[in-house]
Image (cartoon, grey):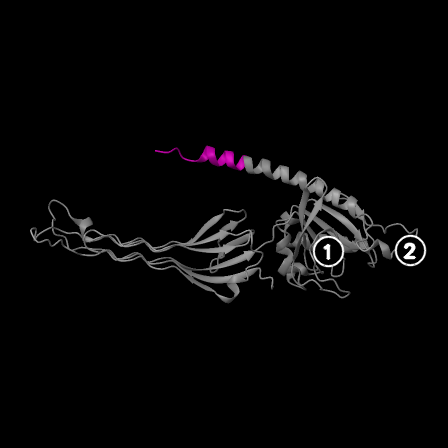
Amino acid sequence: MSFIDRAVIKVSAGTGGSGVCSFARFKFKPKGGPDGGDGGRGGSIFVIADSNLATLLDYRYKNRWEAERGVHGKGKKMTGRSSADVSLPVPLGTVVKDAKSGEVLGEILRVGDTLRVARGGRGGRGNAQFATPTHQAPREWEPGEEGEEREIELVLKLIADVGLVGEPNAGKSTLLSVVSAARPKVADYPFTTLEPNLGVVGLSGSRSFVVADIPGIIEGAHEGKGLGLQFLRHVERTRILAFLVPMDADDPRETYHLLRREVEQYSEVLAGKQHIVVLTKSDLQPDGAGPPECEAPDAVGVHTVSSVAGHGLDDLMEALWSLVERERQEAEVDDGDDSTRAALQAPADP
């Protein structure tokens, strides 16, 4: 299945049904008065969360979505039927923007999140609504209100606990395949990974966290070189960053600082996240040789591993779990504070 993380679609909400001008006519009541009913509401279009989806593939082949208009009103004060709303399911982590202005309309982050992107038109009033004691036979009626139309951009940013960041062939895919059930493509050439991969790491005691393997970052990635700019956004929502530096690199220290610079120039917020340095491919080191020098004063820790030989993986996973668990607890506290503030700021019911 292709990994599609961006789509531009057109959405058109339904127009409201028109009201009707009608007068009651009964056998023994020839002047029954106005009885024109109102039109029904047009269908709205919503973007909703679907935890079973992983890409925006559904919107690659269909880029126009329309809701039906409301049914017109009828005599005998019969209101027209309102049309059903249209729901567009998207993966968790989807940002919804107005394609023309670039304005962010909302984000779909949790199961149950719903965002209206086009409002259905209100139904028009029938002539029965215009009757007054001094205007007993009105012939006025209203057409239905037009439904909203707009072009929206859907951008998927993967939600993961740990994002693996490294140059091509740094060992990201191999590490992910060893510590999780994910099966990313692994080969001995650069840019083997062309799309992000997610894997769930399971530890003892029913502990688990999600790891994202991000395609290789090269110098100039924040400017669009290589695949970096296309996929750097997928590490924006990760809690922890893991910078993978292969021990067979010409200068591991410079490789680490290059990755840090690219992430910082892409997003200062992203660069401020806690990170850990992982020196990979330790099996390539001569027997008895220590790890290469890699100064990383801002990192939480430096770990040496070999995904092929399995060296150091348990310690690395436990270290990542500790960081992830700490971040999760802080996020829960922040969410609670936001809920409390929202409740305090909410206007009282009249």
Instruction: Report if residue 343 lies within the magenta region.
Output: yes
Front position in the image: 20 or 256: 20
Say which mark, if any, is on residue 286.
2
Mark 1 — residue? 177
Could you say where residue 27 lies in the image, as x and y percent from the top left? 8, 54
Using the rendered image of the protein, determine whether residue 272 is visible from the camera's viewpoint: no
Instruction: Report if residue 112 lies within the magenta region.
Output: no
The type of residue carrying mark 2 is Pro
Using the rendered image of the protein, determine whether residue 342 is visible from the camera's viewpoint: yes
Please, is residue 202 above or below residue 39 in the view? above
**Highlighted range, magenta:** 337-350
Could you say where residue 75 lies in the image, as x and y percent from the top left? 19, 55
Q: How many dots with numbers?
A: 2
Farthest right residue in view: 288
Residue 16 figure quarter:
bottom left
Closer to the eye: label 1 or 2:
1
Q: Secondary structure at mark 2?
A: loop
The type of residue carrying mark 1 is Ser
Could you say where residue 254 lies in the image, as x and y percent from the top left? 79, 55
Q: Main secondary structure of the magenta part?
A: helix
Q: In the rendered view, does 277 fall on the left or right side of 283?
A: left
